[in-house]
Image: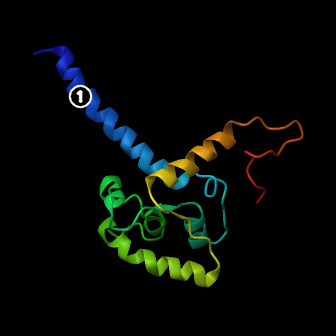
Amino acid sequence: FVMTKAVVWAVVPIATFSWSFMLNSQINHLTEHTAHASDPNFYKHQVVTAQDFGKPLGWCTLYSGGLNTQIEHHLFPCVNHCHLPSLRPLVKDLCQKHGVPYREMAGYWDAIQTHLRHHKAMALPVPAGGGGEGAPKPM
């Protein structure tokens, strides 16, 4: 029994899957468009505080375990993720009909970019008078 080998076999998978989960969950919620969004209507709130990314049945779905259909997941939390891609066009049409912004990124790269822009905005100092680029919008 080699302790180093045991630690590697225990730590590497945990670190890998933890990083993967954090990546896949944060790029759907902490973005420049969704982090400070809000709506008093429960269903609109679920849509404006999340974003989808990637094609519904592409490799983004496979790698993220379905987390790339986050808007649909928030609206239908009890529906198995394998059914969420088929709900995406229905939700998009309904959002368009009612003027609700539906955020969708082309893939991982675009989703990560908007997440990093949010981080950058949050890192900017707030001017003495308050407000600033990174400040939350008033409700």
Q: Position of residue 10 (x, y in %)?
A: 23, 28
Q: Position of residue 131 (x, y in %)?
A: 82, 46
Q: Residue at 44%, 45% (x, y): give it.
A: 23
Left or right of 59 on screen, residue 105: right
Label 1 element class = helix
Left or right of 77 on screen, residue 133: right
The quadrant of the image that shows the C terminus is bottom right
Q: Position of residue 138 (x, y in %)?
A: 78, 56
Residue that numbered label 1 is attached to: 10
Instruction: State the colouring used for the structure image.
Output: rainbow
The quadrant of the image that shows the N terminus is top left
Q: Is residue 14 above or below residue 81?
A: above
Residue nearest the observer in this picture, 14 or 92: 92
Residue nearest the observer in this picture, 78 or 54: 54
Residue nearest the observer in this picture, 116 or 139: 116
Q: Quadrant of residue 95?
A: bottom right
Q: Residue furthest right?
A: 129
